[in-house]
Each structure stands twice: as C-alpha cells, then as structure tokens.
Image: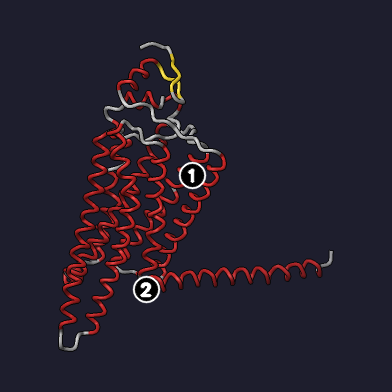
C-alpha cells in the first residue's frame, strides 16, 4: 500500500482504495441540489413532518382522553401512533437537515450508526404494529368467543413484541457493524474515517438486505392472509343474514357491521403502507446487487414516500371510523375552547394591570 493519494469523486483516497473500488462497487455519487430546489424540498419535508407530529399527537390524546376509545384494538393503534411520532421527531428532521446542507457534515461514525439503527427500528415497529392490527381483526371476526377471552394482557404482550423484536433487526446488527461484513474495506475507502463518515451513508451487505426484505414480505403476507379470510367470512355471514326469514338480532347485525368497517379501515392502512414502503424496501434490496449505484435522489424519494405513511395512518383511521372521528372532533373543540378562554383571560388582565399602574401614586 502506498501513501500516494488520488482524487476520485468528492474524496481523496489512496491508491489502495482505488484498487478496492476498481474491483468492487464504485463510489456512489452524491447529488447536490440548487438553492431554490433545496428550499422547495425542505419546505415540503417540514410540512410532512409537522403534519405527522400533529395528527399522531391528536390520535394519542383522543384515546387517552375518551374512555370510549380505550378498546383492545386502539391499544395497538396508539402504539402505532407513538412509533410514527418518534419518526417525526427523529429520522425526519435529520433527513431535512441533510438535504439543507447538501449532505456534507461531520457527526462521527457512532452517531451515524445510531441514526441508521433508529430509522430501521421505527420502520420495523410500524410494520409489526400493522401485522398485529390485522391479526386482532382476524380473531375478532373469525373467532369472536376467543376474542372475548383475550384480555388487555394479550394486547400488552403484542405491543411489547412490536417494540422489542425490531431491536434484533436494527440496533443489534447495525451497532455491531454486522450489516456490512465483507464490506469493511469498501466502507473505509468510500467514506474515510478522517472525513467522519460524511453524510451518514448506509450501505448494507446482501445478507442483511435480504433479511430486511424477507421480514417485510412475511409481515405483509400475514396481513394479506388475515384480511382475505376476514372478507371471505364477512361475505358468508352477510349472505346468511340476508337469507334468513326470521327476525335478525339487530345487535348482532350492528356488531357485524362495526367489525367489518373496522376491518375495512385497517385494510386501507395496510394497502397504504404497502404503496408507501414497497419502493423503499425494493431499493434497499436491489442496491447491494447492482453495486450500490442507486442515486441519492432515488433513495431519498423512496425514503420520504415511506415516511409519508406515518402521516397518512392517523388520517385514514380518522376518516373511516365514526366513533374515533367524533372523539377527535371533540378533542379539537375542547382544545380550541381552552385556548380561547386563556386568550380572553389574558386580554382582560392586561387593561386591568395597566389601570392599576396608572392609578398608583409614585
């Protein structure tokens, strides 16, 4: 190995690294945006981030305030909302910051690994939450007596699994650097330690990318299986009800309609999740097999499409679930009235204090 340095792409690397990059994947090119485009992109990202934070906060607050919403299913819903809140408070702001400064800043290897772990962790938590939501609806409709016996402990266990299991898919393999086994020399040459990892690149090996892809596909198949059975059973039950000549139990019919509507709303969540996340998962899987040549633009676009799902989840649930819709409206009305009272009190106090100051002799 020589000490001669050759200028390639945006970094100075040794001739040894030139040989590493010649034999292996080339150094990914970093895309730099114009100032006007930066402003537009960051503005859109900020709007999505703020909307994600606000609508998920309303979901959590509504379930906490209104006892009627404290159901088994909503235990999973509030857990999903908290995960989406964490995405709005962590990965989203970092991505905005990277876009604004042209992805060129020094934070150190450890910080980059922690942020990559957190990003992968929260995404894994979200998909597990949706899987358990589908399973919850499946048991509720196909095995109602069993569902009645499932208490809060079962829901608590589901939530616990959602938050603990993803640790083994994110923090453990990333912080131990297992995700880039066989890529150590390439990582060192592409982003030398002297440059402090530049803009926090995340290039996983083929094994880790396949594991993430299999996890996503398996979870998605569970959701699709649950909902296919749910709608098949629902169609059969609806046909039986229509064919009855005796008087139908109105409570049973109403309960069936409520369950079907809840299943439909969560089914919409699953479809939305798939549309938002499949492009990002495919890019993550394909990238190591094509020499890590996916551009920052493609990677960033698919990533933010996935982030947008965190904003859409509560909006879709709010628009399709009447009790939840009423509770959210009531929560917003209470919040508005409280702020109005505080504003009026402040307006009334200010003139009084001014009059007191004028009437007080010096």
Direction from residue 267 to residue 342 in the image, left or right: right
Q: Where is residue 171 shown, x and y percent of the image? A: 32, 41
Q: Residue at x 21, y 85 (%)?
A: 249
- Disc 2 is placed on an element classified as helix
Q: Nearer the viewer, residue 264 or 336?
A: 264
Crowd class of label 2 (few under 14; some 14 to 19; many from 20; radius 10 Å) = some
Task: Tell me the quarter of the picture where residue 136 sits.
Answer: bottom left
Q: Position of residue 25 (x, y in %)?
A: 32, 27
- Image position of 211 with respect to 20: above or below: below
Residue topped by disc 1: 96
344 sits to left or right of 90: right
Callout 1 crowding tier (Cα within 10 Å): few <14, some 14–19, many ≥20: some
Circles 1 and 2, Cβ within 8 Å, touching? The answer is no
Mark with earlier residue (1, 2): 1
Q: 334 and 43: which one is in front?
A: 43
Q: Residue at x 20, y 76 (%)?
A: 238
Viewport quadrant of the N terminus: top left
> Which residue corresponds to the image point at 38% horizontal and 11% vertical from the top-left?
2
Which label sits on residue 251?
A: none
Which numbered marker is on residue 322? 2
Q: Considering the numbered disc 1 on the image, is that residue within a helix, a strand or a loop?
A: helix
Residue 180 position within the rendered picture, expressed as x and y whole percent measured from the top left: 30, 31
Rendered image quadrant of residue 255 = bottom left
On the image, the x and y values in percent for residue 162 come to 28, 53
């Amino acid at each position: 190995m020589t000490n001669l340095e050759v200028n390639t792409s945006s970094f100075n690397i040794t001739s040894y690294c030139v040989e590493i990059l010649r034999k292996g994947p080339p150094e990914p090119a970093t895309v730099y945006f114009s100032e006007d485009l930066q402003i537009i992109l960051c503005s859109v990202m900020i709007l999505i981030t703020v909307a994600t934070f606000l609508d998920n906060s309303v979901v959590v607050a509504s379930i906490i305030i209104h006892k009627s919403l404290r159901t088994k299913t909503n235990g999973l819903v509030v857990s999903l909302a908290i995960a989406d809140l964490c995405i709005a408070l962590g990965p989203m702001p970092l991505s905005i910051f990277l876009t604004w400064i042209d992805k060129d800043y020094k934070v150190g290897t450890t910080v980059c690994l922690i942020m990559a772990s957190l990003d992968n962790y929260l995404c894994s938590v979200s998909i597990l939450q949706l899987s358990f939501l589908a399973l919850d609806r499946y048991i509720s409709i196909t095995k109602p007596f069993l569902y009645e016996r499932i208490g809060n402990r079962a829901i608590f266990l589901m939530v616990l699994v959602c938050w603990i299991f993803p640790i083994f898919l994110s923090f453990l393999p990333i912080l131990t650097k297992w995700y880039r086994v066989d890529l150590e020399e390439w990582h060192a040459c592409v982003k030398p330690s002297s440059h402090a990892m530049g803009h926090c690149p995340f290039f996983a090996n083929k094994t880790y990318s396949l594991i993430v892809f299999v996890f996503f596909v398996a979870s998605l198949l569970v959701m699709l299986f649950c909902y296919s059975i749910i709608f098949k059973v629902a169609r059969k039950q609806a046909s039986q009800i229509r064919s009855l000549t005796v008087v139908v139990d109105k409570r049973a019919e109403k309960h069936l309609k409520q369950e079907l509507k809840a299943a439909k709303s969560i089914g919409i969540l699953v479809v939305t999740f798939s549309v938002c996340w499949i492009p990002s998962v495919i890019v993550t899987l394909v990238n190591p097999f094509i020499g890590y040549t996916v551009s920052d633009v493609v990677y960033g676009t698919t990533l933010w499409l996935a982030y947008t799902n965190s904003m859409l989840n509560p909006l879709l649930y709010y628009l399709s679930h009447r009790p939840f819709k009423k509770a959210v409206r009531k929560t917003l009305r209470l919040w508005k009235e409280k702020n109005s009272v505080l504003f009026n009190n402040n307006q009334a106090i200010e003139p009084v204090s001014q009059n007191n100051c004028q009437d007080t002799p010096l």
